[in-house]
Image (cartoon, grey):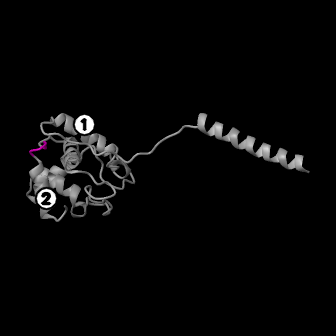
Amino acid sequence: MKSGVLKLILVVIGLNLFFTYIGLDFLPQSESHPPREIKIQEGISQDDLIVIGEKIVFGKGQCMVCHPMNAETGMRAPAIATIGRDTKEHAKKEGISHEEYLFDALVNPSKHIAEGFDDIMSPAHKPPTSLSEGELIAVAAYLQSRGERVTISYPESLSILKEVMKKEGGS
């Protein structure tokens, strides 16, 4: 009887070692890290700002979960492809600058719900996204580039963003 139990224990240990080997050597291993804050430095070019903004929109910002690139049926939020042109029209109607409108739409999205869509976007500077001021400026520059000439720059646009955040209690 003792030899039967000993054989069973050896089989169990052997199988565990075999599956551990398979798991460690043949299955893909991945590490998940929180997104890094992207530092925006003074003097960054508008082109670099737009590239960083695009990376945030497709990555850390998680914008593409709801915003498709092009208009399609069943969209949860407006398409990104023409958002620069669309937001400029809304800014004109409200009598504010395009920059101010974009920053306000990121910080206070509930004030800027596009017709036919629900109020589902959280403020971009608060969890779950928690974008920094520099990242907000980069995202706004990218959005502005989608159909319009970019006027947003860093650090020149920082004062407008801070004013929007202060005025709306967004900080």
Task: Bin the neighbour count of mark 1 within 10 Å (Cα to Cα): few under 14, some 14-19, many 20 and up.
Answer: some
Q: Give above or below for 157 relative to 104.
A: above
Q: Is 154 within the magenta?
A: yes
What residue is shown with label 2? Answer: 164
What residue is shown with label 1? Answer: 51
Number of numbered discs on residues: 2
Q: Is 79 within the magenta?
A: no
Q: Single out the residue that lies furthest toward the right.
A: 1
Residue 63 picture location, percent across and down: 33, 50
- Label 2: element kind: helix
Residue in the foreground of this view, choosing between 142 and 149: 142
Image quadrant holding the C terminus, namely: bottom left
Q: Tell me where residue 48 sits by quadrant.
A: top left
Q: Is residue 27 left or right of residue 82?
A: right
**Residue at 15% from the left image edge and 64% from the top image edge:** 168
Residue in the foreground of this view, choosing between 96 and 41: 41
Residue 75 picture location, percent across and down: 36, 53
**Residue at 20% from the left image edge and 39% from the top image edge:** 49
**Residue at 28% from the left image edge and 59% from the top image edge:** 126
Magenta-drawn segment: 152-156
Residue in the foreground of this view, choosing between 3 and 87: 3
Q: CA distance from mark 1 to mark 2?
A: 24 Å
Q: Tell me where residue 148 sits by quadrant.
A: top left
Q: Tell me where residue 36 sits by quadrant.
A: top left
**Residue at 25% from the left image edge and 36% from the top image edge:** 51
Please state which amino acid type lies under the numbered disc 2: Val
